Amino acid sequence: MRILLQFPEGLKQKALAHAKALEKDGNEVFISASPTFGACDLALDEARNIKADKLIHFGHAEFHHVDFNVEYIEYRIDAPLTLLGESLAQMEGAKTISVMTTIQHIHQLDEIRKFYEGNGKTVVVGTPYGFAKRKGQILGCDIGSAASVDQKVDMHVYFGGGMFHPLGALLATKKPFLVIEPFENKIERIDRLRDTFRKRSMGKVMRALDAKRFGILVSTKNGQHNMNLARIIKERVERAGFDAEILVANTFDFDSINNMLEFDALVNTACPRISVDDIDRTRKPLLSANELMEALRMKEELKAGRRRD
Ligand code: SF4
């Protein structure tokens, strides 16, 4: 069988060993060298181009069904739970908490839940919206496990590495938010970041108020492709009297996009995190669809105000 292997960045150092094992079994094996952001980003074009019979995608659970033979091999990592005891001191007044994590630690969520229940907490585990598949699992674009239970809890607790995942959940909720970072031996309340990101978002909207030409970003990645939304946005921008064009890429190279000097503002329809995490990489304001709508609304208000003057 001809197989293409695909690894996210953190697992690329394991590629050779997996390739060798599959070759030993008589397969012809290739390794994707492209950057990989998630199961939303399957190397389907590469697999089809080399006429692979199968794509093996490591490190993520299935995102959505695709029309290709894909095997998903999730990676589980046992993180130390030693910080759980210490985290109780930061939960004063929080009787009911939600717990969430990434797919790498999802097998530890039950132990985490039992620990907190054993220490007098009521623990709620939320349900993802659909891209994430397990209860309590979050993705940067599926924070249902937090948002679906926001009304019921006094505090959210994220267990896992990095800020990418908890940040999305933080911005979609209102309750106090605790991050337990087992690899950096750190416990942190991140509630204050809500305000920081709200101000950054408003800053982008304000910068877009003078924009006349909008570039709408569409990714060809299987789980990020949203041409329908891009067309709706284009039509909406044009109806407001401005220009819009749809810019297509697989992975956005912001150096290239920065060369497109004619556009005054960019609108993201791909991974929702691009318009949160990558805004410092573009010269022009990089808006989400909601931020664009807010900018258009404010532009119309300003125009009406000028007319009244
Ligand atoms: S957050 Fe972005 S990169 Fe991650 S799974 Fe969702 S669409 Fe893909």
Image (cartoon, rainbow, N blue to C red):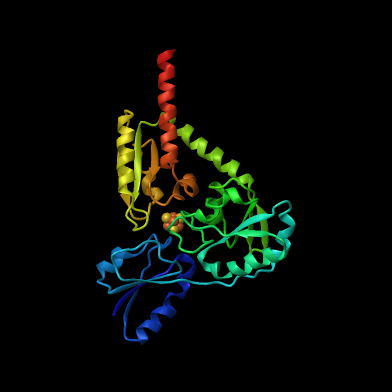
* Image-quadrant location for residue 99: bottom right
Image location of residue 289, percent across then percent down: 41, 41
Image location of residue 261, percent across then percent down: 36, 39
Tell me the quadrant of the picture where the N terminus can be found: bottom left
Q: Horizontally, is 132 left or right of 111 in the view?
A: left
Q: Residue at x 62, y 52 (%)?
A: 153
Q: Horizontally, is 52 left or right of 93 in the view?
A: left
Whether residue 95 is situated above or below residue 231 in the rendered picture: below
Residue 260 visible: no
Q: Horizontally, is 137 left or right of 217 in the view?
A: right
Image location of residue 28, percent across then percent down: 30, 80
Whether residue 84 is situated above or below residue 210 in the rendered picture: below
Q: Residue at x 46, y 75 (%)?
A: 14
Image location of residue 17, percent across then percent down: 44, 80
Whether residue 67 is situated above or below residue 252 in the rendered picture: below
Q: Horizontally, is 155 left or right of 23 in the view?
A: right
Residue 28 visible: yes
Q: Residue at x 66, y 69 (%)?
A: 81
Q: Nearer the viewer, residue 135 or 235?
A: 135
Q: Nearer the viewer, residue 294 or 255?
A: 294
Q: Nearer the viewer, residue 15 or 260?
A: 15
Which quadrant contains ligand 1? bottom left
Tell me the quadrant of the picture where the C terminus can be found: top left
Q: Residue at x 32, y 63 (%)?
A: 66
* Image-quadrant location for residue 247: top left
